Image (cartoon, helix red, strand yellow):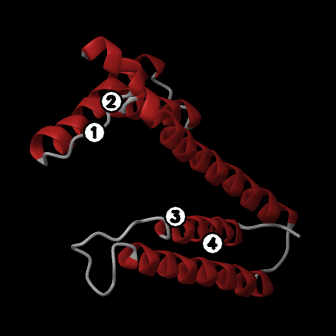
Amino acid sequence: MVVNKDLLSGVVLLVIAGLYYFGSGTIADSTLSDEVGAAGLPQVLSLVLTGLGLLLIIRSLVARRKAPRSVANDNAQDARLLRGVGFLAFGLGYVLLLPALGYFVTVALLIASIAVFERSEQRWLIPVVAVGGAAFYWAVFVKLLGVNQPIGTLWQGLLS
């Protein structure tokens, strides 16, 4: 059985939705809570994610029945699947490194690693674009929008 990107994405989305729903159950209600409660919106969002995951799984099953089978098509699908898993790994790495390294460093590493993954031909330009991109996103979120980003536990001792 060949797993296509829609089937894999649907299953991953169902897992994320389940974890999100489980996590939303731990949100405590405050004295300011209304009838819906603090967990109401996150639980609705997890149900929407569940529905989207199921739609992706159904779409993959329908497409499998319609598509003619060929070795070239399977190889191309496998390559796209591996590429998608690679990008999913970058997202996971970002989430895991963010608390320790902070926003700026993690975004710079993310930009640089994706450039290397995509086989950028100008290797000398990767650090420039990574640091410049991180600085741009930091300026947009922190300075322009006023959304503070994590500094990172690794740097807090140096900055305080």
- How far is mark 4 from mark 1, CA to CA? 28 Å
Neighbourhood count class around disc 3 (C-alpha, 10 Å): few under 14, some 14–19, many 20 upward = some
Q: Residue at x 57, y 47 (%)?
A: 87
Please, what is the three-letter code of the amino acid marked with disc 3? Answer: Gly
First in sequence, mark 2 or 1: give its number: 2
Q: Quadrant of the C terminus?
A: top left
- Label 2, label 1: how many angstroms apart (C-alpha)? 8 Å
- Any mark on residue 23, and which? 3
Say which label, 4 or 1, has the lower sequence index.
4
Q: Are marks 2 and 1 in contact (CB under 8 Å)?
A: yes
Residue matched to label 1 = 149
Q: Which mark is residue 6?
A: none
Q: Residues within 10 Å of mark 1 (few under 14, many from 20)?
A: few
Label 2 element class: helix
Where in the figure is residue 143, as x and y percent of width and height? 12, 38
What separation in Å lies between label 1 and label 3 (alpha carbons)? Answer: 22 Å
Disc 1 marks which amino acid?
Answer: Gln
Please name the residue shown 58% across and 64% down the image: 19
Nearest the viewer among 27 and 71 is 27
Q: Is residue 71 left or right of residue 118?
A: right
Helix, strand or loop under label 1: loop
Alpha carbon of mark 2 to alpha carbon of mark 4: how far?
A: 30 Å
Q: Type of residue at label 2? A: Phe
Residue 104 numbered tag: 2
Residue underneath mark 4: 14
Q: Earlier in the sequence, mark 2 or mark 4?
A: 4
Secondary structure under badge 3? helix
